[in-house]
Amino acid sequence: MFADHFLLELSTSMLILRETACRDVEQQINRVLQSTLTERKLPSFLSLGSNISLSDEFENPFDAYEEGSIIVIPIIGTMLKYGSWWTYGMDEMANFIRLADASSKVAGTILLSNTPGGTTQSVIQLEDALRQRTKPCVGVVDGQCCSGGIYTLSFCDKIVATNRMCEAGSIGTFAQIMDDSAALEKYGYKVKAIYPPESKYKNLEVRKAIEEDDDSLIISERLSPYACHFQNIIKNNRPNLDTTAEGILEGKVFYAYDAIKYGLIDSIMSINEAVKLVSTMAEEKKSIYSQLKF
């Protein structure tokens, strides 16, 4: 099941991924195709999807933690919507965020990022979980936070990096289309796709790109709309962003010291300092709430 989900996602989704990570995706595809270990049983609290609600059927695992705990949730590696036998998917990470937010023992969360990004499908539930949260959340870049990673961490209250040479950016999207017609022809196959006039727009952007070497339609109808959506997400979530910085909304990657200067992230601090920051934010929020109550 997980192999099917993995291959479906990569074959149907645009990429918000740093291009240097494409080789890693290819290796993962080969691993899936060559392996028979495709099944994995998830704990019930991770397999509930976006409509997660606590009930007597299971216990929130974070309720066993100490009062005031800060939960560190990793956003590491290529971001894919569904999990596999070797990693959790981003939908599962979204459920960790929801569960941590629902637990009375949790003061807040940290999203620990070292990711080149992933597919456009991978950020959907993460965005939902982060929009719905009620507790403080700080994004920590510990390596790189690119493309789908910065999309996700932009929904945090703060974004910090653990080192001035950490990387952030690569705001944008792209698509890869494989034209295997020459390989098929070499082995004696000729594939002909036939469309009735009632379906003349079906797969048109891909057909034009492959058959006519015309990328204009896939750019105007698929890539540009999502790129604009991505830019607007960042501008809305990072109101102090210096949009005049060259390439900041067009795919450029910045070291942390420049990302701070241009407002893409906020500061440099250790993970321990980030934990203290979340605790402080939680206490401040609790204090404000207490004053409003009276």
Image: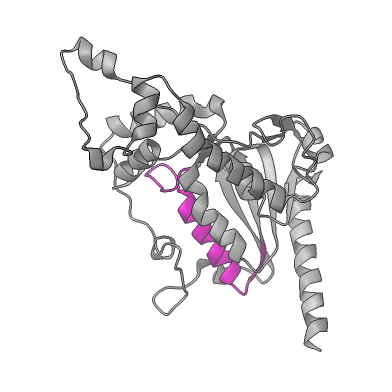
Judging depth in this view, the residue of 221 and 94 nearest the camera is 221
Q: Name the residue located 56 percent from the left edge and 72 percent from the top edge.
A: 63
> Farthest residue in the bottom direction?
294
Left or right, residue 64 beside residue 141:
left
Q: Tell me if residue 267 comes above or below residue 124 in the rendering.
A: above
Q: Name the residue located 37 percent from the left edge and 20 percent from the top edge.
A: 212
> Farthest residue in the left direction?
188
Judging depth in this view, the residue of 189 and 276 nearest the camera is 189
Q: Tell me if residue 234 comes above or below residue 291 in the rendering.
A: above
Quadrant of the rendered structure where residue 141 is? top right
Q: Position of residue 122 (x, y in %)?
A: 48, 47
Residue 122 is a magenta residue: no
Q: Which residues are magenta?
A: 80-108
Q: Position of residue 269 (x, y in %)?
A: 79, 45
Residue 98 is a magenta residue: yes
Q: Position of residue 108 (x, y in %)?
A: 67, 63
Q: Quadrant of the C terminus?
A: bottom right
> Farthest residue in the top direction?
186
Q: Is residue 178 visible?
A: no
Q: Name the residue located 61 percent from the left edge and 39 percent from the top edge.
A: 114
Left or right, residue 186 beside residue 214:
left
Left or right, residue 205 beside residue 277:
left
Q: Name the residue located 65 percent from the left edge and 47 percent from the top edge.
A: 232
* Render colour scheme: one colour
Q: Position of residue 9 (x, y in %)?
A: 38, 42
Q: Tell me if residue 237 comes above or below residue 35 in the rendering.
A: below
Judging depth in this view, the residue of 106 and 151 nearest the camera is 151
Q: Is residue 120 visible?
A: yes
